[in-house]
Image: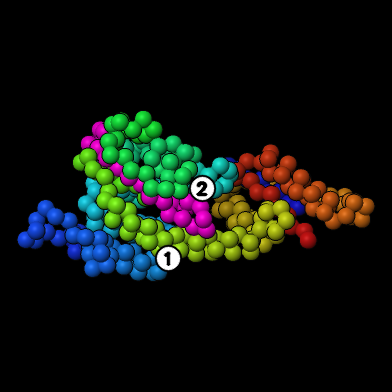
Amino acid sequence: MAVAVQTPDMGDLAPRRGASAGRRMPASPEGAYAGLLEQVALAANQAAGLEEALGFALTRIADAIGWTAGHVWMTAAAPAPARLLATGLWHGADGERFAALRAATLPRERPYAGRPGRVLATGAAVVIGDVAADRDFPRREAAQAAGLRSAFAVPVFAQGDVAAVLEFSDRRSRTPEPELLGVLQPVSGQLGRVAERQLRHDRLLHDTSHDALTGLPNRSLFLDRLGRALARGRRQAHARFAVLFIDLDRFHLVNDSFGHAAGDQLLLQVSERISHVLRSSDMVARTGL
């Protein structure tokens, strides 16, 4: 085991009005929302990652439904409990009017607070017809200052869990049509497939660079980080670091006397205790077999 310590114009998507002005087009396979689903599905298949697909979907949905602003939240599952992290993915929230809302959103992690938190907790869409009357909305004052009066949020699932939340707000008091919420379910499903694809990719990358038992970085990742630290030290004289090698003497006696399961538990306890006292900029790795 080794420890490295470092010093410091989408108009074609919108419902069209013609001789029957004032009447919405039906959300049918031939309607505007079907085009929305097709575009998001195509973008999801071509997206390099989840954020790219979510950003595309956010813009297309907001343009198609005519709501004022939109934002994406991502779920962080670890450490537990799951919580929502604000992203830099916004639509229509530019300018000074929205400065307070953006400031109230970006710095925070919300386990189950407000509209997106309720989506995370319940796994269901949340609709707010009157922002001013919603007491479970920590950003209510900032939203009202931006002139927003109504909102709704929908989940994106990956492997059965909420992976992201899309939220939309509008200056009018309104609620999304049931047809729209119905179309957003398969849209969410398309995005969920991107999320699952990214989860598999991230898990593969993690497994190739971490020890299967302890979850610590393995020898390959440790040597990579060590090489970077050496290179940085050659460029910057003040960039010092230390490497500690820790050997568990007579560890084989634990395996021989109590079995390999006990030996595994010992390794887990040692790795957890060392990790607990290190800083986030430090690394503890399992370099042995």
Identified by mark 1, the residue type is: Ala
| Mark 2 surroundings within 10 Å by alpha-carbon count, few (fewer than 14), some (14 through 19), many (20 or more) | some
- The stretch in magenta equals 144-164
In the rendered image, residue 163 lying in the magenta stretch gets the answer: yes
The answer for how far apart the CA atoms under marks 2 and 1 are is 20 Å
Classify residue 280 as left or right of residue 247: left
Residue 85 visible in the current orientation: no
Tell me where residue 192 appears, x and y as whole percent: 44, 60
From the viewer's perspective, is 254 left or right of 27?
right
Q: Secondary structure at mark 2?
A: strand
Left or right: residue 24 compared with residue 186: left
Q: Residue furthest left?
A: 19
- Of the numbered discs 2 and 1, the one sitting upstream in the chain is 1
Along the viewing direction, whichever of 275 and 212 lies nearer the viewer: 212
Rendered image quadrant of residue 144: top left
Residue indicated by mark 2: 76
At a point 68% along the width and 40% down the height, the residue shown is: 276
Q: Pointer 1: residues within 10 angstroms few (<14), some, or many (20+)? A: few
Q: Which mark is residue 183?
A: none
Looking at the image, can residue 150 be seen?
yes
Rendered image quadrant of residue 136: top left
x, y percent for residue 287: 74, 57
At x 42% / y 48%, what residue is drawn? Answer: 124
Residue 191: % across, % down: 41, 60
Compared across the picture, whether 4 is left or right of 47 comes to right
* Disc number for residue 48: 1
Q: Quadrant for the C terminus, please.
A: bottom right
